[in-house]
Image (cartoon, rainbow, N blue to C red):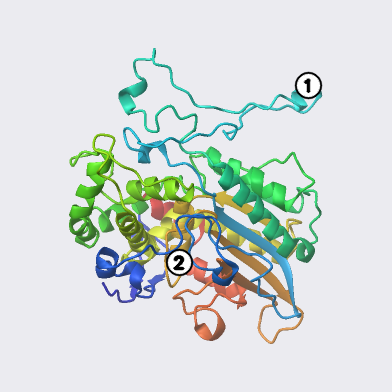
Amino acid sequence: MILSLFHLTFSLAGLTSATNLVHYPPKLTNLNNLSFVLNGTGAPGIFTSSTTPDSEYGIYNWCNMPHVRTREYQVPASDYTLKYIEIIQRHHKRTPYASNTFFKEDISWDCTGEGPVYYGKGTVGVTSDPTVVQWSAYTNPENPFTNSVGPGFVGSNCAFPQITTGGINDSYIHGADLRAVYAERLNLSTTLDPNMFKIRVTSNPITSQVSGGLLHGLFPDSSDVAVLIQADAFDSLSASYSCPVADSIFTAYTTGSVNWTEHLKDGAGLYEELDAVSGIAENDTAGWHTSFDHYYDNLSAKQCDSKPLPCSVNDTSLCVNQSLADTVFRLGSYEYSYYYRDAFNSTLFGALSYGAWVLELVGHLKEQIEETSEVKYFHNVAHDDSLGPLLGILQISEMVWPGMGSEIVFELYEKSSSSGSSNYFLRVLWGGQPMQTSLPLGTNSSGLLEMIPVEDFFDYVNNTIGTGPELFAACQG
């Protein structure tokens, strides 16, 4: 489906929003070509390992996405001085969510010694050094309700979800790679200085689990770190704040649109094959047939953890083969591209649903320009549905499902001399390289977010999201 540009202003609750939003469609590729998605072959990247060969680094790896590291980092010209960075990343690889497991799985998943850690801590005496408490899931046959929701992975001691040992290791390497690039440029010590560095998580424990590995790589001499977190009622990082208008817009162009339901109808035969293995009912009401998200998460989590693809517990001859799994992965990529870039109102949805976090980012950048903050590095650990709408707001030219460890880096530079009206410039990195967008910004208005005047970014945010009060009013309708 080819989308044309559109210009949109809207008025809500008697208030005309300052939002003056223009949607620029993404590139047409195999990722958002439904014919190829359904009839093509192969997975849209790596789905079986956290390792990407150096010669291929930068390609899509669902298990461990490319990030900033010394080998590929593009060093700016010497007249640019790095003043501040803000990074938002998705957590690293994990077990699947419980809602994405089959009623009864045919393989095992063991988490001995790698469970989540939960305990309280005080400031003085014995309260400052409590015993580490690690969760280990278990079931008891005397509990009559145990199997009412299905055993899932039978007898597993894992939480669903939790970051796996492999995910913690990927987090540590991620942090160490970031340190190798930015520590000297930002004068970061091996010990975390809370005046210079902030880290933020969501209320989902997996973001804190990732932070432990990440921080060990970033600040190897620190072992006690406070992370920032907002309440779910207004959290901008997880986008859990109330925005009924955004919800209505999203529903209208997904379940309420033939543009969305078309691929579900075309995929009916695939659902039959998958359901025969999983045991999911055709009239399921838990969302297994409103998108391919559940199957995507189930299969990709297994393959990233080197587990076999599943077979039916009732008929072991019925199994998901690699070709079927690859088709699910292509469909998942297609869905994310539609959610956040292809759909006519996807940019509007992103602006409403994730605008609050972008306004906080703008505030941080302005503090640096005004020299009112000592913070040089702000790191956010979030989720795929955090990065998705943000990539939509930035109107990335090729939208993918943000894989494990995906990161967006905002680098603020000061230039020693400039012929323009500003000495401050912004570079935005995706997969470790300057982000290519569909926006008329960047070098020669090419959409490459490489050293753009920061005022241009501020103007774009103001036109796309508006002010805080305008965003709040627009969300309420």
Q: Quadrant of the N terminus?
A: bottom left
Secondary element at image label 2:
helix
Q: Residues within 10 Å of mark 2 (few under 14, many from 20)?
A: many
Secondary element at image label 1:
helix
* Residue 464 disc label: 2
Residue 437 appears at what percent x and percent y? 47, 74
Find disc 1 in the rendering and name its residue. 126
Residue that appears at 23% across and 44% down: 275
Going by the numbered disc 2, the residue's amino acid type is: Thr
Residue 82 appears at what percent x and percent y? 73, 69
Q: Residues within 10 Å of mark 1 (few under 14, many from 20)?
A: few
Relative horizontal placement of residue 149, taking residue 373 as reference (left or right): left
Going by the numbered disc 1, the residue's amino acid type is: Val
Looking at the picture, does residue 25 appear above or below residue 336? below
Looking at the picture, does residue 105 appear above or below residue 174? above
Q: Residue furthest front?
A: 317
In the depicted view, which residue is nearer to us: 400 or 141?
Answer: 141
Looking at the picture, does residue 264 appear above or below residue 39? above
Residue that appears at 46% across and 53% down: 384
**Quarter-of-image position of residue 75:** bottom right
**Quarter-of-image position of residue 327:** bottom left
Residue 353 appears at what percent x and percent y? 43, 54
Relative horizontal placement of residue 182, taking residue 428 as reference (left or right): right
The answer, for residue 118, to whether it is visible in the render is yes
